[in-house]
Image: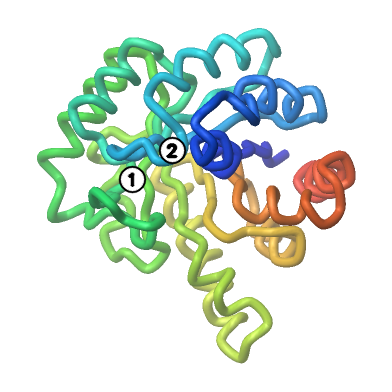
């Protein structure tokens, strides 16, 4: 069964826009977990324009109150980010090659180019007891190198799938993601997925076997504005639990 981890960055962005704790990110995460989310994801960037490094410890306490729930902290592994992760020890840390000021994640790691850097960081995460995941492109020819570097999982960057969903290229790209997942799994890697997945394109994507976790935030928040958070959470859980 695939787990749903809700990315709370957009809730944090709303909070930061008014300069006070409203909406309350921890309280909102608590509500999501009570509605059935199996995890909470946050992605603090160096400028902390939405999720903040200070949110990590608070959300860890929220998640720990829900047996079986997981906290996934993702981001570019600068010194401050890694210090927070090693101190708080979330269930999972997803390393993402974001540049400072980048609007949103838009590519996976060049695994071959960053081999030495990633190997060191992945070792540190393992020593801290934190499950590791690398944000990767589905068509990276060095995909299985993630396992050799010490990663536990990869997260497939799904924007190419989402952007082409329903287009003439849709089936070709979907099959590329299916092949990438199979390749990673054969190498001993767990497979997560995320970026621009939504209620419309998620069912098809989860025809790929053994996707362990999907991280969804932006679309879920927008859909909740339209349909209500209870209805949206129920629909996502019905999709992920049917696989």
- Residue 210 screen position, x and y as percent: 63, 46
First along the sequence among labels 2 and 1: 2
Instruction: Tell me if 116 is positioned left or right of 149 in this view.
Output: left
Mark 1 Cα shell of 10 Å, populated few (<14), some (14-19), many (≥20)? many
Instruction: Tell me if 184 is positioned left or right of 37 in this view.
Output: left
Q: Quadrant of residue 105?
A: bottom left
Tell me if residue 243 can be seen: no
Q: Nearer the viewer, residue 236 or 170?
A: 236
Dot in front, 2 or 1: 2
- Looking at the rendered image, the quarter that the N terminus falls into is top right
Which residue in the rendered view is the most extreme toward the bottom?
A: 168
Q: Nearer the viewer, residue 47 or 199?
A: 47
Q: Write down the residue under mark 2.
A: 43
Instruction: Tell me if 179 is positioned left or right of 64 in this view.
Output: left
- In the image, residue 89 above or below residue 227: above
- Residue 125 screen position, x and y as percent: 30, 22
Q: Tell me whether the residue at label 2 lies in contact with that at label 1, contact meaning CB atoms closer than 8 angstroms.
A: yes
Label 1's element?
A: loop
Q: Write down the residue under mark 1.
A: 96
- Residue 185 screen position, x and y as percent: 48, 47
Label 2's element?
A: loop
| Residue at left offset 38%, top offset 48% | 135
Q: Nearer the viewer, residue 177 or 57?
A: 57
- Residue 221 screen position, x and y as percent: 69, 48
Mark 2 Cα shell of 10 Å, populated few (<14), some (14-19), many (≥20)? many
Compute the Cα span from label 2 to label 1.
9 Å
| Residue at left offset 78%, top offset 49% | 224
| Residue at left offset 76%, top offset 59% | 199
- In the image, residue 104 above or below residue 168: above
Give residue 62's mark: none
């Amino acid at each position: 069964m695939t787990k749903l981890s809700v990315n709370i960055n957009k809730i944090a962005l709303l909070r930061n826009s008014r300069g006070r704790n409203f909406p309350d990110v921890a309280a909102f995460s608590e509500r999501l977990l009570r509605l059935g989310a199996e995890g909470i994801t946050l992605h603090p960037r160096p400028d902390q324009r939405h999720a903040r490094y200070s949110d990590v410890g608070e959300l860890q306490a929220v998640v720990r109150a829900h047996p079986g729930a997981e906290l996934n902290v993702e981001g570019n592994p600068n010194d401050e980010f890694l210090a927070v992760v090693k101190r708080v020890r979330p269930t999972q840390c997803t390393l993402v090659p974001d540049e400072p000021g980048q609007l949103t994640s838009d590519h996976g790691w060049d695994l071959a180019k960053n081999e030495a850097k990633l190997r060191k960081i992945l070792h540190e995460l393992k020593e801290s007891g934190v499950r590791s995941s690398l944000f990767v492109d589905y068509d990276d020819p060095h995909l299985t190198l993630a396992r050799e570097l010490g990663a536990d999982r990869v997260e497939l960057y799904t924007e190419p799938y989402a952007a082409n969903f329903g287009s003439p290229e849709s089936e070709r790209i979907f099959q590329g993601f299916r092949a990438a997942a199979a390749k990673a799994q054969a190498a001993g890697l767990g497979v997560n997925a995320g970026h621009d997945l939504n209620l419309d394109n998620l069912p098809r994507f989860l025809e790929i076997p053994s996707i362990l976790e999907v991280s969804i935030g932006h679309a879920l928040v927008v859909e909740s504005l339209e349909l209500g958070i209870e209805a949206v959470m129920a629909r996502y859980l019905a999709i992920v639990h049917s696989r």
